[in-house]
Image: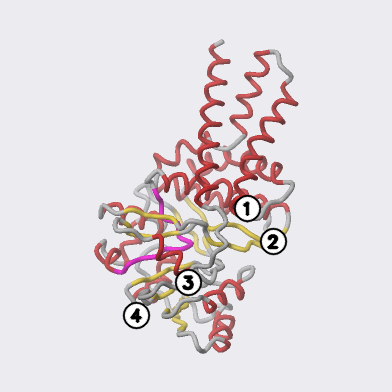
Amino acid sequence: MTLLGLALGFCALTVLVHGASVAIAAYRCRVRPRHLAPAPGTPPVTIVRPVCGIENFIAETLESTFRLDYPDYEILFCVASPGDPVIPVVEDLMRRHAGVPARLLIGNDTVSSNPKLNNCVKGWQAAAHDWVAIADSNVLMPRDYLQRLLITWRADTGLVCAPPVGSRPDGFWAEVECAFLNTYQARAQYAADTLGFGFAQGKTLFWRRAVLEAGGGIRALGSDVAEDAASTKLVRAQGLRVRLVDAPFEQPLGRRRATEVWRRQSRWARLRRACFPLWFLPEVLTGGVLPGLAVAVALHHLGAPVLPLLLVFWLAWYGAEMALARAAGWHLSPWYPLHGLVRDAMLPALWLDGLLGSSFEWRGNAIRVEADSRAV
């Protein structure tokens, strides 16, 4: 009876948390068909886009920066190496959109062990405006991208961010990555943000210059292995909040291999463990696999048919996530329950890998995380 009670209690708790997080994310990320026009008196903005190498859809995502419906903004593309193959792509886009102020900045400022941050320093220093959006090269910007960032800002805000939402997956493992990005990670981030515990997400970091300078400037983001973790701590130290944009922005995926998905999720797990260990530890209890096992234990003790009722439980669990994806207008495969189950089967192994591992590779850079969350 003790085992039965524990199984039922664990299952009830996880179902409650799962249902609440789905409901919160569905509300925050619901489809908003109305395009936000620029408000009168909107401030000028600098967009810093660090680029490195050729990625899937790179020309399309970078070109979206030139098509924004905003009266006054500049684009600064940052490349670390003069031999990077992405440079001709950027130069071609700048020629074809000569009416949009844009510059290509080449060089590397080694202010930290974070290659992306080192690449961004020159963009931050060259920015002409007080509002600066640092956006990864694989973010597909809607035309009202800047309006949606600005409208999220409040008096107590220190930083506005947006998690990536996977779109246009090609193949099974790209579908699994969508299940990681959208209905798992984005769902958790929006639940935390709604409860007042927003975490920065490095895909988009929208700063008011004075906030970052008050915390030590862009070099201060090298205090942690990940610039978004350092951003979170810097903003909270000033008594301000990180806020997430309602309805996040797309990241088109294309083809993915199993090893790519694993390495990316392994890297993020190790970063979360290093930067926010107390938030990382409960992750082992997330996903639908462990609640499913608890259901199976309870059904066995009750003498009920285990397999058919377990399948019903999982269909309901992943059906809730499918409802979230539909409400948000995200990509949704009819085989989603299988993709979600594969994702959740990976979670315990990823958690253990994140707990024990301390090194990873990012764009050809071997990085080791130290005990104080700094990187070498």
Q: Which residue is mark 2?
A: 255
Label 1 environment density (alpha carbons within 10 Å; few <14, some 14–19, many ≥20): many
Q: Do labels 3 and 4 touch, CB within 8 Å?
A: no
Secondary element type, mark 4: loop
Q: Earlier in the sequence, mark 3 or mark 4?
A: 3
Q: Which residue is mark 4?
A: 128
Label 3 environment density (alpha carbons within 10 Å; few <14, some 14–19, many ≥20): few
Mark 1 → mark 3, Cα distance in angstroms: 30 Å
**The residue under label 3 is which amino acid type?**
Ala
Q: Nearer the viewer, residue 219 or 135?
A: 135
Mark 1 → mark 4, Cα distance in angstroms: 36 Å
Viewer-side label of 1, 3: 3
Q: Which residue is mark 1?
A: 178
Secondary element type, mark 2: strand
Q: Is residue 230 left or right of residue 248?
A: left
Residue displayed at 52% across by 22% down: 9
Secondary element type, mark 3: loop
Q: Earlier in the sequence, mark 4 or mark 2?
A: 4
Q: Which residue is mark 3?
A: 37
Secondary element type, mark 1: helix
Q: Do labels 1 and 2 touch, CB within 8 Å?
A: no
Q: Position of residue 108 (x, y in %)?
A: 41, 75
Q: Position of residue 320 (x, y in %)?
A: 62, 40
Mark 4 → mark 2, Cα distance in angstroms: 37 Å
**The residue under label 1 is which amino acid type?**
Cys
**Count of residue discs:** 4
Question: Which image quarter is the C terminus in?
Answer: bottom left
Mark 3 → mark 4, Cα distance in angstroms: 23 Å
Label 4 environment density (alpha carbons within 10 Å; few <14, some 14–19, many ≥20): some
Look at the image and give the residue range highlighted in magenta: 198-209
Q: Is 3 one of the magenta-colored residues?
A: no
Q: Nearer the viewer, residue 263 or 125?
A: 125
